[in-house]
Image: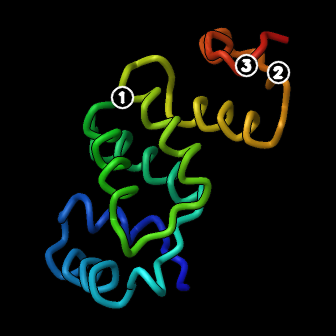
Amino acid sequence: MIGLDTNILVRYITLDDPVQAMRAAQIIERQCTPDEPGFVSLVTMVELTWVLETFYEFSNELIAGAIERTLGIATLSVQNEREVFTAMVALKTGSASFDDALIAALGAWAGCSSTLTCDRKAARLRDFQLA
């Protein structure tokens, strides 16, 4: 397995630099395989959403679509795929930001009864509790 940094996914998704986009496609589509997938960490997924929102001004729907497509790539292994999917759905439906929803999903995955927060918006999520 080989780890992939955020910029590889950004180039693959945005195609903003033809040379780097082609290199990213070669990595994801040829160098990585289902037997030897590229590893995408949770940090990479959170960075990806931040970059797409901040620098590329993607809407929540476009970001959710990019996450969903990333999860569907057979040559990638996304850390905590189920929790990333849960967070993507929350973003797509407008019920939470990706990062807040991921924090809640990971807390539930870890067996937490709830995740305490001072963030009133995050507290609306089922697995958060206002401190």
| Crowdedness near tag 1: few (<14), some (14–19) or many (≥20) residues, C-alpha within 10 Å | many
Residue tagged 3:
128
Using the image as rendered, state which of residue 112 and residue 119 is in the foreground: 112
| Crowdedness near tag 3: few (<14), some (14–19) or many (≥20) residues, C-alpha within 10 Å | many
Report whether 87 appears left or right of 49: right
Q: Amino acid at mark 3?
A: Phe
| Crowdedness near tag 2: few (<14), some (14–19) or many (≥20) residues, C-alpha within 10 Å | some
Whether label 3 touches label 1, CB < 8 Å: no
State whether residue 38 is above or below residue 70.
below
Whether label 2 touches label 1, CB < 8 Å: no
Q: Amino acid at mark 1?
A: Lys
- Could you tell which of marks 2 and 1 lies nearer the N-terminus? 1
Secondary structure of the residue carrying numbered label 2:
strand
Residue tagged 2:
116
Residue tagged 1:
92
| Residue depicted at x 50% and y 35% | 98
- Could you tell which of marks 3 and 2 lies nearer the N-terminus? 2
Q: Position of residue 89 (x, y in %)?
A: 43, 31
- Could you tell which of marks 3 and 1 lies nearer the N-terminus? 1
State whether residue 121 is above or below residue 109.
above
Disc 3 to disc 1, how far (Cα)? 19 Å
| Residue depicted at x 36% and y 40% | 53
| Residue depicted at x 53% and y 84% | 2
Report whether 98 appears left or right of 19: right
Using the image as rendered, state which of residue 91 and residue 36 is in the foreground: 36
